[in-house]
Image (tube, coloured by chain):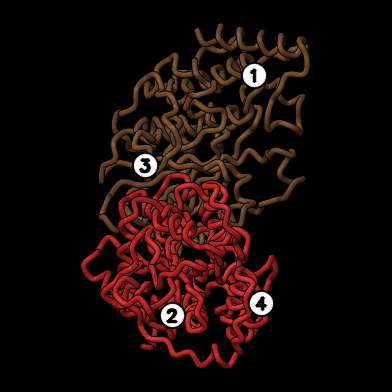
Chain colours: A brown, B red
Amino acid sequence: MAQPSRHAHEAPPRDPVRRVAAAVRRRVLEHTLTHNGGYLSQACSSAEILATLYLRIMRLGPSQGPLVPRPFAGVPSAANPQAFTGADYNGPKAADLDRFIFSPVHYALVLYSVLIEVGRLGPDALAQFNRDGSTVELIGAEHSPGHEVTAGSLAQAISQAGGIALARRLRGDTGRVWVFLSDGELQEGQAWEAFAALAHHRLGNVGVYIDANAQQCDGPMTAVMTIEPLAERLRAFGAEVHEVDGHDPEALAAPAATPGERDRPLVVIARTDPCRGIERLRERAPKLHYVRFKDAQEFAAYQALLEQLREEAR
Amino acid sequence: MEIVARPHRDNLVRWAASRPEVLVLSADLTASCEADGFRDRYPERFFSLGMAEQNMMGFAAGLAREGFFPWVHTFAVFICRRPFDQVAMSIAYPNLPVRLIGFLPGITTPGGVTHQAIDDIGLMRLLPNMTVLECGDATDVESVLDVAQAVPGPVYVRMLRGEVPRLFDAAEPLVLGRSRALSAGSDLLVLSCGICTEEALRATRALRERGLSIAHRHVSTLKPFTDPELLQAIADARHGVIAMENHSTIGGLGSAVAELIAEHGLARRLIRIGLRDTYAHGASRGYLMREYGLDAPALVRAAEDLTGERFGLTDEDLAAVRLDTLTRADKTEDL
């Protein structure tokens, strides 16, 4: 039986972050239904984090990318001057503007949905989602909207962000480099190499938001390989660490607002719920990483839930 | 023959003076990779990333995306094995102009199997967008910087350190995609790279004195492997081709030559001298070259195999060959 949504019969949220986050969950659910599969729990956990980054934290100029995403132009090579990255959706590169590096690219649909809700992509941008020859890929690469680096081999983006941040300091840029990470990536040794280097080189222009949903492909992280105590570990590596409720826009935005020069990386551990906003997902626990509907009955239940969420949003 | 002590060390300092966009990244092997001169002269352009090569490759990629030219200095094994995924995804896929300078090729180090890069050329050749260069003497070492810097994408340089012979005239720099013609001949073709060229020179000279007509070319660009002169040189070699390298016979020069011969239907025999699908171990360079058959006697044996002749050369004959710095073959036909 379908359980009632936690937000059933509630008025649509007035807070812009919450409004965007709710729309993102609906859109990701819609595409999970359309494709009979998707990274749905990642939308539930990260919607407020990404919405807060785009609406309240990052200083970005207007999107330079087309509302309808470009088709794939081929892999980068000396013979292919047509290759591009999706960084232009995050605005122009300028000394005083921020940059966004998106690491767990299996969250791509969540990012695309945020870009639509904040007006950086058109409402029909997902028509080509997961289609052959499209840049709006299931697992994003650097040509995908909002993506700047090829990050799907996890924990590589944080190091690349470090290099970008070092270059920006050498140039005297005042803009910051924001990185969105998933918690599972912190099982990779490279992530810790990167945090050591960020602290050693005093790269205070780097800010990292971690979606700590405690889930990974095989199940709960505590069963696969624990990374706790995460905050203590990160502090020991020289970062300024904040632990916040990852669904609370105020709590998410506060650590980034502190003024003044920084000489160490900022890390916000956003503790999140992988079923937030779609309570029905809990019955699939502990396997939440990728949702594929088991049968027509389950599909219909989620379809009904989507209708209900849409009704609430009106 | 002139021996140059640590040619890269001072050359890098000199070369980088007018290039503020050039940075050096190091993973705790700075003096070992002759980057200490750069570090001391340009401390604001030198970045120590510690023993953490995976992260160092990501930092290099980020810096390159922002318009800098990171020159990563470490041992070849620590560029090509441990952070292979990072080199492939963070650097090679986006075609970023990172210069990967790998030291201690093959059996040049007594450091044993962990330090001996016997598969680096194969691994780097596998990566799309990667250019692969190897130095064989002090002139190569000095001139490879300009060549690498002119490539718009990533470059792997198999580098030499310490006491390096000058085989080639300092006025004749390494040229991308062009092998050096060291001698002309019609019986067989010897293609050598890296430290094997010096060793090959001992054998080719002795063989020539025994009446064999040998074409010998030094290869410094392993990828792209498109030197137009190679095809003709292979076709002209009556008895066949010998590829000689300080690397596994799988994936390196010998493989590249085999691909060329097969794809162009050149119907020439090929003998690959190199490490024959084996690891090496910690010992002196001379000992290992002899043990694994990477030395001048090995080349003589290969020439005897291809020609069906016996040349009666002893190890002592070959060791006695005196080498001079060479100018181009078209200037001095007989070495």
- Say if labels 3 and 2 share a chain: no
Disc 4 versus disc 1: nearer the observer:
4
Q: Which residue is mark 1?
A: A6
Place of residue B256 in the rendered image (x, y in percent of width and height, measured from the top left)? 54, 56
Q: How far is disc 4 from disc 2 in space, using C-alphas?
A: 29 Å
Specify whether B145 is left or right of A303. Answer: left
Specify whether A276 is left or right of A16. Answer: right
Q: Which residue is mark 4?
A: B292
* Front-lying residue, A289 or A8: A289
Assign the N terminus of chain A to one quadrant of the image. Answer: top right
Q: Which residue is mark 3?
A: A99
Q: How far is disc 4 from disc 1 in space, using C-alphas?
A: 72 Å
Place of residue A36 in the rendered image (x, y in percent of width and height, measured from the top left)? 67, 17
Where disc 4 sits, the SS reads loop
Disc 4 versus disc 2: nearer the observer:
4
Disc 3 sits on a residue from what chain? Answer: A
* Front-lying residue, B177 or A299: B177
Disc 2 sits on a residue from what chain? Answer: B
Disc 3 versus disc 2: nearer the observer:
2
Residue B121 in view (yes/no): yes
**Mark 1 neighbour density, 10 Å: few (under 14) some (14–19) many (20 or more):** few
